[in-house]
Each structure stands twice: as C-alpha cells, then as structure tokens.
Image: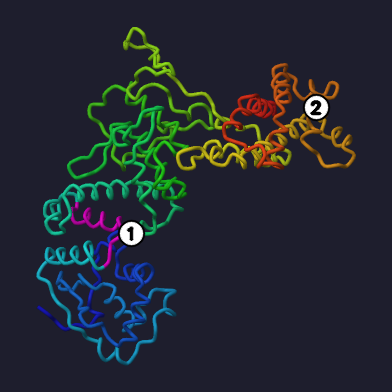
Amino acid sequence: MSITISPLDLVLDTQNPRFVILARREQVDIRKYLVTYEDVCQLAAAINEYGSLLPGERIVVLQENEKYVVIEGNRRTCSLQLLLSRNLIPDGFAHRIPHTSAKILENCHRIEVDVLPDRNSALDLMTKRHIQGVKEWKPLAKKQFFAANYNDGDGQSVQNLSRITGIKEGDIKEDIRDYKFFFNVYKKYCAAHPDFDKEIIVLKIDPFWRIFKAKFEYPVGMKVNPKDFLKISYDDTFNTVSALPPALFEQITQLVFEKSIVEERITTRNVLSDIEEIRPLLQAVMDSIDVSPPNDGDTSSGDGAAAGANGTQQPPANGGNGEHPPQGGANGGSAVGQDGNTGDDNGDQSGGPRPGGPPPRSFFETISWRDKLNPTNQQHQGLLYAINELYALSNTSCGRQKAYRTFPIATGMILRTVYEQALRLRLMQVNLWGAYCQLRNGALPTLKTMEDFINLDTNKATVFPDQGMIIIYDRVIAATHRDFLNANIHYPGNINVTADSLEAIAAGGMYALIQGIINLIV
C-alpha cells in the first residue's frame, strides 16, 4: 500500500538501531544525531541539487499511534525536512544546509511512501537492508538493536529475531549480553562521574569487550579465561552476574571502563592483567575464590550496588609488592618452582598460608615516593618528574612487555636523570649543595663531579648517615653505572643498551640507593 504525505508529517523512527543508543530520542535529538554522524548535510545538498529523491529510493513507513513512522529512509526524510523547514535545522548546522531549490519545493512538498502492515514486516525489511547490505550498522548499534527488540524477554524472542535476521541465536544472545553489560557499567560510571558526558555513540567500545573475553596469564604461567576468573554467568534475560563480592566486581568493571573508554589507554591488543590498577585486585579475586565461604548464591550484577566507603578494594598507593601476581596456582594450589617441585612434598592441603608469593622486582615498578616528594617543593621537582616517568616505563605495558623493555635506550637516559637528581636533592637536604657549587666555580653541575664531591673527606658520611646506604653507594660507584649510563647518551650505538642490562643496574644497587635517598626525605 502507498500513500502521499508531506515529509514534515513523517516521524523519524525512535526504534531504529542507529538511534536507540541515544540518551534522548526526541525528533530534535535524532535530527541532530543524523546531521552530526550520518552525513545528512551532504545528503541534503545532493537531494537539493538533483531536485528530488533519486529514482527507486522510496521511503517506507509504518502507521503507529495514528502517525506514520519512517522504517526505511530516515536520512532521506530528515534531509527533506531540513530543506522544507529550516527552523528544524539543529543549531550550528544552518550554514551546511543549502537554500532550498524551487525543484524541491515543487517535487517534494508531498511524496509517495510505501506503508508496511506491522512492526514484524518492518523488522524483516530493516535487518535485510542494513545488517546484510546497504549500510552496515556499528557493532554497538546492532547489539543494542537486539537488546531493544528482546526487551528483557517482553519483546521479540531470540528465536524470532534469528529467523527474521538470519543471524545465529548464539550470536544474538552474545550481542544482548554484551550490550546490557556495557550499558550497565556505562550508566554506573556516568552516575559516579557527572563530568563524563559522552554519548555512547561516540565511544570506542571494542577494547572494553575484549578485556572480558581475551585470556590472560594469572598466576604466572597459567592462562585463564576472564569469564571463569571473574566468576561471571548470565541470568535468564542475559544480564551479567558475578559470584565475586559486589564491590570487588564493580571496581574491576569500572576500572576497565575508565582505562579503555574514558582514558583510551587500553586497546584491543591488551588483556585484563595489562591494566596496572587492576593487578592488585587480581589477588583479591583469587582470595575471594579460594577462601571466601559460599554466599548462598548471592551474586552481583554488572550494575550491582555501589561500593561503600569501606567496601572497595584499593590498590597499593605506593606501588608496593601487591601489584605483582602470586606464584601460587589458580585454585590456591602450590607454587611451582624452577626445578618443578611444588614445595608441598606431603600433598597436605589442610590449611595454613597459601604457598608462593609475589615475584621479585625486575626494575623500578615498586619505587615509592608517596608522602616524600612534594610537587610544590621546587627542590623536589627534578627528581619527581624524572622518577614518575621511570615508574611509568616500569609498569606500563607496551604490547606484551613492559615499556622499559621496548624502549631501553630512552629508559636508560631517564634512569641516569633520576640518579643525578637523587644525588642533587640529597646534597641539598644535607646543606652541601652550596659547598659543591662553590667548588665548581660557576661551572654546571655534572654527575661525575657530584660523585667525586660525595667521596671527599667526611661528605659521604654526611650524605649517607646509615652504613648500609654507604655500602650500597660504594657498590654503585664500583660498578661504574655512571659510565655506562653516560655512554648510553653519548654512544648508544657502541654499547647497545638492553632491558636486561638496565635490570642488572637496578639490581646492582641503583634501585636501593634511589629508594634509600627518597626515604631519607623528611
């Protein structure tokens, strides 16, 4: 059946998959979305130049609540509406909509449209035209389309959606689960962060979903599935639930959202254990799985209760050992040593502390300056800026390895800066900086002359009042770390700095010396 109607009397479809992800779906909101993201300004210009809709591009509608809703052709309808009534043009876009041609006024003030009998027919048409052909929907739009039509079990059945669209039932269920999980986490984050005002449609969402699907290594040497590790399951209407404590599960999901969506630090190449702030929580998950008593089936939803002031797991503020994964088994089993022994000769599983523990530090991933270096203290700023970068290089993942392993030359330069700034600050702290500068007679400070000055007479005992610190400092001097770090700057092609050589410097006393100097700050 066909009718003739003014485009201004047509209603843009609020259930169209491209629009249902909008927080508001009034006609004005849909038009703004279309001109912003769906190239309607260009389409309006093309239609205006041609003088009418192109042949064969008929608009398809459905009568609902005594109104004709556009099922196919929302972009064309919006273009005609903006050309026929310029007061409908969203703010900021008037200059992009051309002045209406006489041909449009003549040919399009009323147009012929096709009318479908019901929503099922409309659904069949839309999915065949879009999912399989003319204009591909974004993944989020497709997932939201299925979630909206399923409507928590009160709308179309999964079987019917599969029959209409030709998409497998399993894929539809996964789309519904994905969307509901993401949308619940999104709502929670927005509620807790009112300044975050991005619409879902502009978000890069694939990294978020990958984090909860890609296997990762935890504990060391064991690959685990995030769904199993986080004790995730789904209820009858495809809501995500977890057997973890609600506050813990919520904190993990919110951190993943923040790092992957808000800060965009996570890509589709990352996994859950790559998120620095989540690493300390992985052990909390293990503890919850291994030792927590059953909770009578109580589960937490992806949009579960907000974490209370004392209910949230906080990662170590000082970058301490808590951020390293334990060496124990995934189910509380014994840690496996390098010789293959389990450390449990008797096989006794009757209790006691779980074997294993955090692995040894590799570089500067546990360096701590909290409550020591003050960003408002000018004397502290040189060391603070440099050590903050060194800490980031030690903890930030670059692909499958830490950044310092990917960029050893740059890391070596920063390490040298940290070492120099640490000695400089220490000389200031013990009031020897003036005496050192006087000896320099106006020349710029150098790392070598700082070391030489500290070695003069009683200066070393003043700079390092603890005998243990003196031993560490002497070890650094004897190892000629300064010469190696200087060569990295002046002759990087000759010495070929590697991550292993930097780790050896850290383990050879440099880490202990720098941490010790920071600890002496009062």
In percent of the image, x 20 and y 51: which residue is there?
172
**Quick one: quadrant of the N terminus?**
bottom left
In x, y percent, where is residue 457?
86, 21
State yes or no: residue 147 in magenta: yes
Residue count near mark 1 (Cα–Cα under 10 Å), binned few <14, some 14–19, many ≥20: few
Label 2 sits on residue: 454
Amino acid type at mark 2 = Ile
Residue 368 visible somewhere in the drawing? no
| Main secondary structure found in the magenta portion | helix
Q: Is residue 78 left or right of residue 255?
A: left
Q: Is residue 235 visible?
A: yes
Closer to the eye: label 1 or 2: 2
Q: In the image, 155: left or right of 21? A: left
Q: Is 208 covered by the magenta stretch?
A: no
Secondary element at tag 1: loop
Residue 63 image offset from top left, x and y in percent: 14, 72
In terms of depth relative to the viewer, which is nearer, 185 or 480?
A: 480
Name the quarter where the C terminus is drawn. Answer: top right
**Residue 264 horizontal/vertical position (percent):** 45, 50
User: Could you tell which of marks 1 and 2 lies nearer the N-terminus?
Assistant: 1
When asked about the image quadrant of residue 250, the answer is top left
Q: How many marks?
A: 2
In this rendering, the answer to whether 155 lies above or below 394 is: below
Amino acid at pointer 1: Ala
> Secondary structure under badge 2?
helix
Quadrant of the image occupied by residue 348: top left
**Disc number for residue 23:** 1
Of 311 and 395, which appears nearest the observer?
Answer: 395
x then y, percent, for residue 351: 34, 12
The crowding category of the residue bearing disc 2, from other C-alpha atoms within 10 Å (few below 14, some 14 to 19, many at least 20), is: some
Q: In this picture, which residue range is highlighted in magenta?
A: 135-151
